[in-house]
Each structure stands twice: as structure tokens, then as C-alpha cells.
Amino acid sequence: MEFRQLKVPGAWEITPKQLGDPRGVFLEWFKASSFAETVGVPLDLQQANCSVSAAGVLRGIHFADVPPGQAKYVTCAKGAVLDVAVDLRVGSPTFGVWDTVLLDDVDRRAIYLPEGLGHAFLSLEDDSTVLYLCSTGYAPGREHGINPLDPAIGIDWPTTGRNGLALAPILSDKDLAAPSLAEAAAQGLLPTLASVEAYLAGRPA
């Protein structure tokens, strides 16, 4: 596996080594020892999710209260998505900064997002299948969102899919009604860098 740190501190792109022969392909898309050695923390797996999205579906920006937050290790088993990590940690030098990783069924990369970051992705073709390993289970009362089209964040979402056809963003009613980054900050919804660091410092290794 090759690890590349993204512009958002704590977020990583992971590119697996693929072993192919006439039968197909084999790869390790997650390996606990390599992950912990590189990232510096283990991934405590508590829930695994799968979503299937039509071309143009835009999910996010989602995040959870810290503590405990929710770290995610995400890959795309079929199709292609542009995956985005956003620094939502108030007090972080890179607050509001975002970075992207193309997740698809060609390079079969993954992205790791630690607690305190926002996560979103845009499906680039029909039936794009995304798999998530999560450090905590889903808890509606502590889950939040920010509108992924917020111009203050300015994510450069693609307008064409992998097949070259035009994409029109398709958002859930919940994501469409989500607050902007400034509104979420004013409402006290965002995690702070201090709370994230304190939680990670006290978490068992």
C-alpha cells in the first residue's frame, strides 16, 4: 500500500497494490498494521456501510459531534466517485480547506478521514458503490451536515461524469437544507480542534 497525506491534516489517500492474472484481481484495501504504522492511530471498526448512487448524486458534507466523532475509511468497489475531505475543526490552521481523491474500480484507492472532518462525494456514474469502515455506529442525534454547494467552501465539483455525460447534482432534501459553513459555526455545530485533539489523546491505542 502507498499512503499520501492530503492537504487536510489527518486525511490520507491509500493506493493498494493490485495482483492480477487471467482470473481477475486481488488486493488488500485495508490492513490494520500498515494503517496504524503510517497514520499513527488504529481504526476501531464499529460499523461498515455500503451506498449505491446514480450518476450526479451528491452526498454530504457529513460530520459527527466530537467526542466521539466518526473516523471513516472509504473506497469505491464499483463505478467512480470524487471523494472530498473538509477540515471543519474550528481553530485549525486549515479550517475550511478541502481536498479530493478519485475513488474508482480502476486504481481502487481509499481515503481515510479522521474525527472532526467533513465527508462528501459526487457519483461520477450510475451504480457507483461506496464502502465505508466507520469507527463509531450511526447516531442520528450527533450527526450533522453542511451544504456541499456552499460557495464559501468552494468545492470544485465535476460537471461531467466518467462517461463524458453532463452531471447535474442530485442532493437529498436534508443535504440541500443543510446550513452553510458560516451558519454551522454560528450555531455551534462544528467540532473544535481542541476537542478533537483531547479526544484522540485520551483514546486507547
Image (spheres, rainbow, N blue to C red):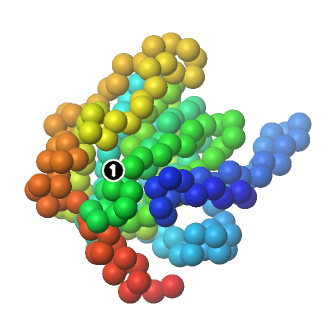
Residue 175, by quadrant, is top left
Q: Residue at x 48, y 73 (%)?
A: 44
- The residue under the point 66% across, 66% down is 31
Q: Nearer the viewer, residue 163 or 11?
A: 11
Q: Is residue 73 visible?
A: no
Left or right, 121 with reference to 148? right
Left/right of residue 22 with respect to residue 152 in the rendered view: right
Looking at the rendering, in which quadrant would you find the N terminus?
bottom right
Amino acid residing under circle 1: Gly
Classify residue 21 as left or right of residue 70: right
Which residue is at 51% across, 85% downward? 205
Element under disc 1? loop
* Residue closest to the eye, 100 or 103: 100
Instruction: Judge whether residue 90 can be spotted in this image.
Output: yes
Residue 182 x %, y %: 18, 48
Pick whichever, 8 or 102, lies toward us.
8
